Every structure is written in structure tokens, then in C-alpha cells.
Image: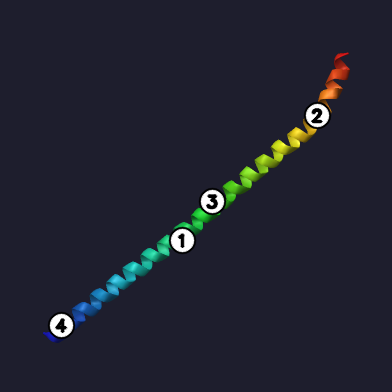
Amino acid sequence: MEEKLSRYVRRHMMTVLIAVLSSFLLLFLGEFLLYKKIMVVNRMVSEGLMQIKEINKVKPTLIPTLKILKK
């Protein structure tokens, strides 16, 4: 009886250990994929901000030429 009980406890301890380890593995993979997606979004935002800065730099040079063409 004691042997059956110890085997039962050992088997369920292994099952619980495998379940906990697999859940941590899934959490790690999810965090990694989320990190990659955040990096892609950050890259897109910084590229958009750089384009806005370039437009603001180019814009003042175009305004005087447009005024010259209107005269």
C-alpha cells in the first residue's frame, strides 16, 4: 500500500512539474514574440518621426520658391 502511494505521489509530482515547466516555456515564448513585435512597432514609429522631421526641414526651403513662382 505504501509503495502504491509513493508511486502515485511521484507520478503526479512529475506531471505537475512538467505542467509548470511547459507553462513557463510558453510564457517565455510569448514574451519573446511580444518583444519582437514591440521592436517592429518602435522601428516604424521612429521611421515615421524621422520622415516628419525631414518634411519640416524641406518645407521652409520650398515656401520661398513657391512665392517666387507666384510673382
The kind of secondary structure element at disc 4 is helix
Mark 4 → mark 2, Cα distance in angstroms: 85 Å
Residue receiving disc 4: 4
Where residue 47 appears, as percent x and y from the top left, is 67, 43
* In contact (CB < 8 Å): disc 4 and disc 3: no
Q: Residue at x 11, y 84 (%)?
A: 1
Numbered mark located on residue 29 in the image = 1
For label 4, the crowd category at 10 Å Cα-Cα, with few meaning under 14, some 14 to 19 and many 20 or more, is few
Q: Is residue 10 left or right of residue 47?
A: left
Spatial CA span between label 1 and label 2? 48 Å
Q: Badge 3 is on which residue?
A: 37
Residue at 42% across, 61% down? 27
Locate residue 16, reporting x and y percent: 28, 70
Left or right for 27, reference 12: right
Numbered badge on residue 60: 2
Q: Amino acid at mark 2?
A: Pro
Of all residues shown, which one is farthest toward the left? 1
Q: Nearer the viewer, mark 4 or mark 2?
A: 2
Is 7 or 61 nearer to us in this picture?
A: 61
Dot in front, 4 or 3: 3
Indicate left or right for 31 with 67 as reference. Answer: left
Of marks 1 and 2, which one's residue comes earlier in the chain?
1
Mark-to-mark CA distance, 4 and 3: 49 Å
Image position, residue 61 (x, y; %): 83, 29
Q: Earlier in the sequence, mark 4 or mark 2?
A: 4
Residue 16, compared with residue 68, is above or below; it is below
Instruction: Classify mark 1: helix, strand or loop.
Output: helix
User: Gap in Å between the C-alphas at discs 2 and 3?
Assistant: 36 Å
Q: Considering the numbered disc 3 on the image, is that residue within a helix, a strand or a loop?
A: helix
How many other residues sit within 10 Å of disc 3, few (<14), some (14-19) or many (≥20)? few
